[in-house]
Amino acid sequence: MDKKQYGWWICFACSLMLFCNTGLSTTGFSIYQPYLIRLGGLTNTQASSLILLRNLSGFIGMLCSGKLLQRFEIRRIVTAGMLINGSAFFFYGISRSFFNYCFAALLIGFSYGAAGNIPATILITRWFDRYRGIALGICMASTGLSTIIASPLIMLLMEKHSLQFAFFSEAAFVLCCSIIVYALLRSRPECLHTQPIGIINSESDRSNQKYASKTAGRSLYLYMLAGIFLFGMPGNILYAHISVLYETSGFDAMQVSFLLSIFGAALTIGKIGYGYMSDKIGTYRSSWFLYSFCTIGTLLSCFAWDGSIWIARAAVILMGLGFAVTTVSMPMYAAGISSESDYAITMSRFQSLSTLGALLFGTVPGIIADKTGSYIPAFIAMLFLIIISSVFLQFIFHRIIRTNVIS
């Protein structure tokens, strides 16, 4: 194994970690929502409350992440997070009441908050001087793979065996993956006496790195944080309700599973494509493409009542491509509005505020569905949030870029 290229093994380890800690815990977990309602005896509001609690615990985990990273080796934090994640799926399996489901949701949330996107982003930053965009895209794309690979398998396990058997199977899988990640992961290139991939030595090359020349001014910085918070509401919540939207609109279980797989495939392509586009044409331009996909896809999902599988397919494809911006844009935005020395703290704030938005909005779709008897009004509300927040974010980001260039 060439130590100079070991960063790609780090990319693989981070991808596997995110597949478990973020993909199976959030994106891929949406397949469970209708089964928790139908087999677990939960109401729509209670099922949405599990998402709320997961996001609350994830937010706390993100707040703790900085302190944990200062005190412990990042390799140990990531592995411990995966072990907690596996334990959470085990507790889901043995749960027989809403209270027990809540405890499992808190565990699974803390694992992805403390050992999810933040440590993965830091590891990629340490191990890549060049190709960071594509490396981040590959890592974040692993969360989409959870719906392509895991969702059909999970549904099969639930249909052929039981809801509990599916949870126990995921617990065993995550625990096995934690062993692989611990074996591959190294906290820094210095641990293997090597250097980051594409290391930048000269000042002329270093000036081309995709960091702002200085951190944005306080007012614009706060506006950017507000935009991240606002987009975090639909950005982190919408995909978790795709399955119940289409199931309650008359689609059968196989069709819903297929739609989730398509969504996952599009999400995977979108994240890798967004990372590549950001390296080529910049974060601002590439983000417009994805926000447009988000908007059109969510609009089409509001026609779920029509029962057209073709409209549903178009909706989940566009939403999958577009919602790649939810996670991959944050490292890009953070690099664009802050200097290299402030990058880590900016990324941590972005991730925390995005999760806080999801936390506050988490039960709203379920409450709307309980009041109206349909998830379509909730998707209409999220459509308006997407439009407002994306335009606001892009406007502020463009102002910051212009300010840095002029100064």
Image (cartoon, rainbow, N blue to C red):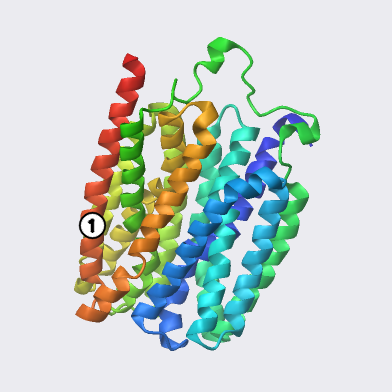
Image position of 124 (left or right of 298): right
Tell me the amino acid under the disc marked 1: Leu
Tell me if residue 229 comes above or below residue 286 in the rendering.
Answer: below
Q: Residue at x 55, y 31 (%)?
A: 131
State whether residue 95 appears in this view: yes
Image position of 1 (left or right of 100): right
State whether residue 373 appears in this view: no
Helix, strand or loop at label 1? It is helix
Where residue 178 appears, as percent x and y from the top left, is 71, 59
- Location of the N terminus (image quadrant): top right
Q: Residues within 10 Å of mark 1 (few under 14, many from 20)?
A: many
Q: Residue at x 35, y 62 (%)?
A: 360
Tell me if residue 14 comes above or below residue 156 in the rendering.
Answer: above
Q: Which residue is mark 1?
A: 383
Residue nearest the observer in this picture, 68 or 260: 68
- Location of the C terminus (image quadrant): top left
Q: Residue at x 25, y 35 (%)?
A: 395
Q: Name the quadrant containing residue 113.
A: bottom right
Q: Name the quadrant containing residue 154.
A: bottom right
Residue nearest the observer in this picture, 222 or 183: 222
Q: Residue at x 22, y 62 (%)?
A: 381
Tell me if residue 316 comes above or below residue 243 in the rendering.
Answer: above
